[in-house]
Amino acid sequence: KNQVEQSPQSLIILEGKNCTLQCNYTVSPFSNLRWYKQDTGRGPVSLTIMTFSENTKSNGRYTATLDADTKQSSLHITASQLSDSASYICVVGSGGSYIPTFGRGTSLIVHP
Amino acid sequence: SAVISQKPSRDICQRGTSLTIQCQVDSQVTMMFWYRQQPGQSLTLIATANQGSEATYESGFVIDKFPISRPNLTFSTLTVSNMSPEDSSIYLCSAQSNEKLFFGSGTQLSVL
């Protein structure tokens, strides 16, 4: 069964600090991995998308990495801002299905 | 990229009534999806909305409870019928365009 596990479930950091969120998956065959940011009560917004051949992708202060061998991805947030407070969702697409598998998300709170 | 307008953004409804959620995409897309997201949970796919044919429902979801329309390549509706408090959730539509997955802003539904 395809699964996406994210850790930690929640995280609290101080403004200006860096943090790293983790995503482990068992989706097969692998097609792509996406990270989304979801503000409370809003729809998810795409941050990065990576295919099998890509091992890093940046979007401003967000940098995603992918290790397709170990089936792990991370999302690193640099110099966090209060507006980074949100849920971050890892989504893995399968080559065998048009329906991706969603992680439960990591809830990030940035305190001033 | 695709922009999806979803409405209403939130509603409070009485038990036994029905609510129709609308999603308008600013470009033609082949595949549209409807998701439910309960607090602290990942997104759960309700159904895939196909243009010109009946929607394809996932296990645990039925057409009588969640009728879907897809009259053209830019628009879809989801109706939550005969609502109960257990239907309180965030409902999201999404569309796939150029291998990217875009989401509407979500509808936060509370059933009393």
Image: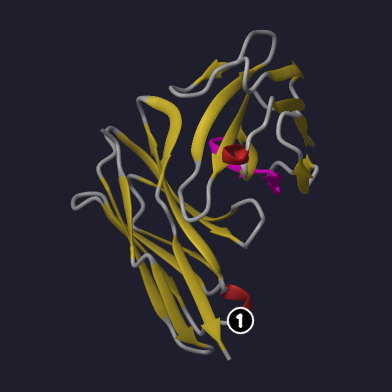
Q: Nearer the viewer, residue A27 or B109?
A: B109
User: Is residue B19 found inside the magenta-colored segment of the image?
Assistant: no
Colour mapping: secondary structure
Identify the subunit bearing mark 1: A
Q: Residue at x 52, y 23 (%)?
A: B61
The residue furthest top is: B53
Q: In the image, B64: left or right of A101?
A: right
Q: What residue appears at the point 80 percent right and 43 percent down from the top-left corner?
A: B8
Quadrant of the drawing holding the C terminus of chain A: bottom right
At a point 50% along the width and 69% down the height, the residue shown is: A62
Pick the residue in front: B59 or B76. B59
Question: In this figure, which residue is indicated by the disc labeled 1?
Answer: A82
Quadrant of the rendering where the N terminus of chain A is positioned: top left
Give the side of residue B45 with respect to residue A101, left or right: right
Image quadrant of residue B102?
top right
Q: Is residue B16 above or below residue A55?
A: above
Percent x, y of residue B74 = 77, 27
Q: Relative to B78, does residue A21 appear above or below in the rendering?
A: below
Residue range (magenta):
B98-112
Whether residue B40 sits left or right of residue B94 in the image: it is left
- Main SS, magenta region, reads strand
Residue B25 place in picture, x, y as percent? 76, 35
Q: Is residue B112 above or below residue B95?
A: below
Q: Give the SS element for disc 1.
A: helix
What amino acid is found at the position of numbered circle 1 in the picture? Leu
Please provide percent x and percent y for residue B86. 57, 39
Residue B66 position within the rendered picture, expressed as x and y whole percent measured from the top left? 63, 23
Query: How dense is the environment of label 1, judged by Cα within 10 Å: few (below 14), some, or many (20 and up)?
Result: some
